Every structure is written in C-alpha cells, then in structure tokens.
Image: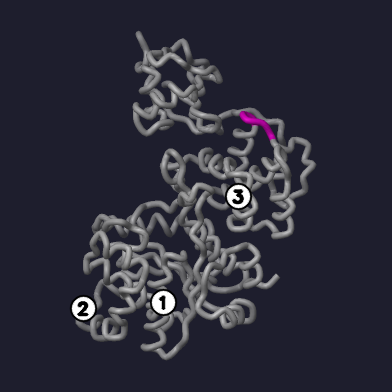
Amino acid sequence: MKLYEDLQSRKFIYQSTDENRLKNLLNEEKIAFYAGFDPTGDSLHVGHLLPVMGMRRFQQAGHTPIVLVGGATAMVGDPSGKQEARPILTKEKVSENAAALKKQLGRFIDFESGNALFVNNADWFMNMNYLDFLRDVGSRISINRMLSAESVKLRLETGLSYLEFSYMLLQGYDFYHLYKNHNCVLQIGGQDQWGNMLAGTELVRKMARYEAAVLTFPLLTDSNGAKFGKTAGGAVWLDTSKTSVFDYYQFWRNSEDTEVGKLLNLFTNLPVDEIEQLAALEPPMINRAKEILAYEATALAHGEKEAEKVYTAASAKFGFADPDGKIQTSSKIKNIRHSVSLGDNLPSVELDASEFDGEGKWIIQLISDAGLASSNGEARRLLKGGGVYLNDERISDMNKNITGNDFKDNSLLLRTGKKRMKKIIIK
C-alpha cells in the first residue's frame, strides 16, 4: 500500500491543503517535511505521539523528516487550545528541555541513518533583527486572517497578549526558513495547528513563490470526550521518572475494547489487515489485542527488553490473555515465554525501614508516598471505596498502620484499583 492510502486507512489524515497534490508528493516523490515541538517541558507525553508516529511512517516510506524543536517559540508560547498564557521559561530551561526532547524523539525517528534532521528555531530567531522581521514577515500576513484562526478567536474571549499573538508569525517563518534552507515542502501537525500552518504556506508562497503543503492529524479523545493520554493520575509521560514503564504499558493495556483497532492503527507498525482481525476479537480474547497494543507501544517508547519485562510482570499478576498462542500476530510478543513470575519488574518505591518502626506508617500516607494517589484526600476516597489492597488483601480500616511485620523479604505489594500498583521496598 502506498503511503497516502496507508495514512488514510489508518485514519491519520484530518485535513490537508490540496489532496491530489499531497497524494502525488507522498506516493511518487521523496520530499523533506517537518513537524514542530515546543520544549515547554522536559518530556513528551502520549498526547504528543500522533505526529511523531506520522513522522515515523513518512520516514519509513523514504521521506526525510525534519524535527523542529522550538527553542525560540517556546519562549513565546502557543495559545492554541489554552485558556490562559503559558508560563514564560528561561532560555536555560528551554535549552535543557530541547535536549531532553531530542533524546526521546530519537527513539521513534532514525537520526543515525542520515535521512533525518534535528533543528532548533532558536538558531535563526535569536539573532534576528526585529525591524527586519516586521518588514519581511509582518507585512505579508493579514491581521484579518490571523484573527480568523480558531486558536486566536478562542483566546480573545479570555485575553491574548501581543507576545502570544505573534506566535503565528514565528511558526509561519519556520516553514519559510526550512523551505529556503532544506527544501522542506510539507508541514504536518495536529488539527489545532491548522491556522498557524496556513500562515506558513502563505509566507512560503509570498516570499518564495512556491505552493507548500500542510497535513493535519486528528486530535484524539476517549469515549468521554477527554483528551487522549490523560488518566486519573494525570498525563502519561515518556520520561520514566514521571511515568514508570509498567504504568506506561498499563495505560495502553487498559484501553477500551472499542478503541483498540484505532490505537493499533495509529501507534503500531502492524499491518492494517492484521489489525482488523485483532480489533474484531470478542471479549475476553480482545484482551490479547490490548496486550499486543501495549507491548508494541511500550517497545517503541522504551525498547523491546523493557516491553518484555513489563508484559510478563503485568501478565503474571493479572493473567495472560492468550497463554496458548492461538491468536495469530506478527508482533514479537508471540516469542515471549509465559512461564514467568513477578520478579523485580513491577514499579517500586524505596522507603526507610525506620518509617515502619513502632506504631508504623499510616496507610493513607503510604498510598500518597507510593505515588498511587495525588493527595491524602484522594487516598481516603480510594480506601473508602474499597479500592486499596495490601498484598492482595483489601484494606477497609481507614486508621490502619503498616509496620515491619507486613513486609516479607523487605517488600510488600500495594495496589489501588484493578491495575495500579507499587512494590514497596524498605531499606
């Protein structure tokens, strides 16, 4: 299947400037294209991954990705989808974040082959003369068109600074700079970036007399309309200090039955026809499709060895969906042996043994300290609802204290709900 048709069948495409021309660029030519990521934080989360997976598929088809990290634009702040202005970051923090994002993006995009570029727009903006920018760029973009962009209209109701308003000009200039210096002819991104992306095509057309193209991906939501990648505990991060590999795996493993096919298409490299068969499985065998999704997504983000560890740990605890391997798949998960134990693959937290001396540690405080609740109040609600387990025994006593006697070989298993757990180790 050619790239454009593959993207269509997997439901990557939301909107584009010229479908026929885009189809020709993707199927018949080898082009340079780009996607931008502002380093407003030191880690990507699952909500960022759709354009990353899009770039990966483009590169696999022979096109050259340009990964742009917005070292300059991050200090301005994109108003798209925000009710209020982002905090203004220091240059030093933006630089640190950019380096962290490059490392994470390198797990998905092959920079070693030479068929990919990593650029930072701070390199061309930091020494740019402001008056030159206004004359060359500001004179070519209509205020009326900028005001018509959804990202601007929504913020006019709550207040929009000139700093944020100028973001569209900066992103538009990025496209012109990449076209001029790297022959980049296509920008890809989320559907909320449509207005900013069109500003880029307008600048390329007016400053270079070329019709550049853009393609947007859909913004994903769950069945309740919430942004994809959010959980009760917050965002699901790629940084393992923010989200453990086990919890990352469990996020995908806990996908809704009706969403598995869509997520397999967007976030794995499995063939479309195989995905159709997996998505058509009935409960309880649909859980095998979820295992495959979780394994493949985790392998991309954290490597196959880590994916195997958490797959075996989670399945040893909750059960293997297809222990006899009856469901056919091209995923490497089929080669993993099932005769495993929990071992050390569960997410863990180390605490000082002295905290459990005497009367011990209050169960509510332990839940919070283990990172299984964001506050003592949330921990109370979990326990009151019957959702707290200590070594698989439900805890109902709100005043229970945990002592050294509750530990076996200096560890115990603390669980909230069906899937979130931590191994508590004392030293």
How far is the residue under mark 3 from the one under mark 1?
Answer: 31 Å
Residue 305 shows in the view: no
Q: What is the magenta segment's predominant secondary structure?
A: helix
Q: Disc 1 designates what residue?
A: 198
The disc labelled 3 sits on which kind of residue? Glu
Are circles 2 and 3 on residues that touch, CB within 8 Å? no
Above or below: residue 379 compared with residue 257: above
Q: Which mark is residue 259?
A: 3
Q: Disc 2 designates what residue?
A: 130
Residue 263 shows in the view: yes
Q: Looking at this rendering, what residue extends furthest in the front direction?
A: 157
Residue at the image position 47 percent from the left and 13 percent from the top: 406
Above or below: residue 22 compared with residue 108: below
Quarter of the image where one finds residue 169: bottom left
**Closest to the observer, 414 or 306:** 414
Q: Position of residue 97 (x, y in %)?
A: 35, 56
Q: Nearer the viewer, mark 2 or mark 3?
A: 3
How far is the residue under mark 2 from the one under mark 1?
Answer: 22 Å
Q: Say how the picture is coloured.
A: one colour
Q: Position of residue 128 (x, y in %)?
A: 25, 77
Q: Looking at this rendering, what residue extends furthest in the bottom direction?
A: 209
Marked residue nearer the N-terminal end (2 or 3) = 2
* Residue 317 is covered by the magenta coloring: yes
